[in-house]
Image: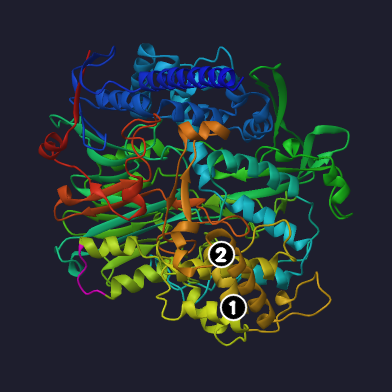
Amino acid sequence: MLAKVGRVLRVIVIVLVVGLLAGGLWLGVSIRRSFPQTEGSLQVRGLEAPVEIFRDSFGIPHIYASSEHDLFMAQGFVHAQDRFFQMDFWRHIGSGRLSEMFGESQLESDKFLRTMGWKHIAEQELASADEESRSSLEAYSAGVNAYLAQRQGAALSFEYTILGLIARGYQPEPWTPVHTLTWAKVMAYDLGGNMDAEIQRARWLKEFTPDQVADLLPEYPDDQPVIVPRSSTGSTFPAQSGTAFAAVSLPDLTPLAQRMADVHALTRSGFDEIGSNNWVIGGSRTTTGKPILADDMHLGIQMPSIWYEVGLHCKPSSEGCRLNVTGYSFAGVPGVIVGHNEHIAWGVTNAGPDVQDLFLEKINPANPNQYEFNGEWVDMEVVEELIQVAGGDPLTLTVRRTRHGPVLSDVMEDAKKLDETSSLDLPSPFAVSLRWTALEPTHILQAVRHLNRASNWQEFRQALQNWDVPAQNFVYADVQGNIGYQLPGRIPIRASGDGSLPAPGWNGEGEWTSTIPFEELPFAYNPAQGYIATANNAIVGSDYPYLISREWDYGFRARRIVEMIEATPKLSIEDIQRIHGDNLNAIAPILVSLLREIDLGAELTDRARLLDGWDFQNSMDSAQAALFNAFWNHLVRRTFRDDLPDGPLPNGAWGFEVFRQFVQDPASAWWDDRGTPETEGREEIFRLAFSDGVADLEERLGRDPARWSWGALHSSTFESPLGIGPLGLIFDRGPFATAGGSGSVNNTGWAIGEDYSLRGLPSQRMIVDLSDLSKSLSVITTGQSGHAFHPHYIDMADLWRNVQYHPMLWTEEQVRVDGEAHLTLTP
């Protein structure tokens, strides 16, 4: 009997092994089918002349062509080679067509996205584009489609094998210029945030007094850096008054916040650590005698990287072909967004202007498609949208738009409850609409094209006049030794109010009357201090005549960057790397000092001694950083979870500033836990939070501090849109131990109340040496390829997390020496 069972088990094991081997072989062959051809020659219909594509040792393509048409066409081709599924996914977000790919699970997101109307605006932008912009978009699209003509299904990307099981018969459609333009809208949404803040502020004003809300949202501190301390004209203007939150009656906008959270999950956005650092050092302060420019943009963690490195080179250079640029592109968009050409370099951080306003619309009870404005009923624009659903029936969605923009309350969950939750001084019925600069036609791709060609400060600024949305802090340097800063963007001027709360849409008080003229936007050129640094901090002081925003990052990263710049008389490339990798936790010195004054009891005091001698750096191998961040996590939760049970909890620079202010009051009402009969103060909450943090740490990493490290808690997992369940084994990568933290220059953000893993990160790092462009450095988070298991799928992750770089190849000689592949595209 046992022998028979043994034979059966052997047969089962053999069958399983053969099945696994066969499955593994099938998987390996299927995945490798999508790897692009990067050697030899390929014929591509539509090219005007042969194009050479050299890929360096990290798979970064350096494209050489004799016309800009061919450069953009080849760029579209290589983007499709490496990242087409990413491109396809993002264009479906931009057009509100995710249900076509993933079925009914994405229907609510599609309703919201269709209501936003990004494709509608993109079509208007294409219709109004100049001939050169249209030509570049069409050439780029032709390159993408030339690749699609050669490959489909699993040969295009392995994701389509999986997708075929979800949406049977799905085939990617040809790429069009509108798809590129909708991509730009998604990016603008990623970098937005005013609407989230406006909704949160309105929700809090229903629960707290205006003074309490002001405690939760402090003004920008006077002791933190300002990018352009005086107005660009040098004039003095009346001080801007601080935000005064009125105790107004507002509807419950929680359902809108929930709908926005769904889209944030898709685009990996919506957390308070999205931002960036950049700085430029003039030659008087560098070891090279010429400027050094640094940039790292903070975005949501994702797989593959949001950035795609590329070099675009006209060979030979001519009046009709002047591009010679390298840097970071978006897969789906022609040109280089951030980088350098042979004359200038530039980097960006998010400026965060208030360019999104919610309006409460008074609706005609007799006609739901009319709203009141200045005493008259006005017809809404009404559009019917057809949403295709994989595996289900199509759905017709009615989209309504007022003079302000789309009516978002139409796609809010439980929208009918709006009237039930409002007070008598709000109209009944009413709706909620959005005005946003990105919902009006823009010309950003024209700006990108001219930026790529700019050769001096004047041409750089001229290019940025068309950079409408999203507004960014641009730093500039050129090979002549000049440095500069410019804020571009369409920033509204309001009839009244500051856009901090939803405004009545019927009386004209919150209307946008115009935008800040470009020549009056803040800028700086060769400032006396010899450097410019930005980190989403306040751009201007109270002497500036217009309102840009009141929702700046609170300046801790900016201050640390400035401190490190000023601490070294002459900065080298290595010094810039050190600033990029700085992990200082700015709130730690304050809280550790207070913690030492508290009687924690014998066991906890022994644990607290571990913090003695800590340099306050969130280093990857630091046990002290692990202990402090566990304490910080539970301190925020102990302090605010009873007060803010559903909302975000203060973290990063926001949390640092909130605690920096009210730790000065040991008896503040915020310390008291509403859930207990006692009245707690600062000391009790510190003691409880430290105890919670130690218990949390011991549960996760064990009782022995020798086994504790911040990197063991704080890890990066790069997740693909299809990395669901077991599919994560194919498409996701990680976890990788990571340094830094929320609010550090190395801004690897994590969420209070969740685990300690990354939600946001420096999505790239760049250092440009204007004394010798060939010595510049670069890195992205994952790798160039979007194909799972490709050698360049995750080959930059270790460089990135250790704040290391690869050479940012510039000369053709460098490219040829470092090249691993050479492909010629022929007409």
Q: Which residue is mark 2?
A: 697
| Residue 536 visible here | no
Kindly identify the residue that appears in the image at 50 percent across and 71 percent down.
Answer: 542
Report the number of discs: 2
Give the vertical position of 165 relative to 504 (above or below). above
Q: Amino acid at mark 2?
A: Leu
Instruction: Point out which mark residue 595 bears.
Output: none
**Left or right: 324, with 416 as reference point:** left
Give the vertical position of 28 relative to 406 (above or below). above
In 3D space, how far apart are the residues under numbered discs 1 and 2 (Cα atoms)? 27 Å
**Left or right: 309, with 719 as reference point:** left
Q: Which residue is mark 1?
A: 661
Kindly indicate the quadrant of the structure image that contains residue 158: top left
Residue span colored magenta = 568-572
The residue lying toward the viewer, choosing from 736 and 470, is 736
Give the vertical position of 168 relative to 264 (above or below). above
Kindly identify the residue that appears in the image at 52 percent across and 31 percent down.
Answer: 727
The quarter of the picture where the N terminus appears is top right
- Colouring used for the render: rainbow
Q: Position of residue 767 (x, y in %)?
A: 26, 54
Q: Amino acid at mark 1?
A: Gln
Labelled pair 1, 2 in contact (Cβ < 8 Å): no
The residue lying toward the viewer, choosing from 372 and 760, is 760
Give the vertical position of 577 relative to 380 (above or below). below
At mark 1, the secondary structure is helix
The dominant secondary structure in magenta is loop
Kindly identify the residue that appears in the image at 64 percent across and 50 percent down.
Answer: 357
Nearer to us: label 1 or label 2: 2
| For marks 1 and 2 on the same chain, the one whose residue lies earlier in the sequence | 1
| Residue 154 visible here | yes
The quarter of the picture where the C terminus appears is top left
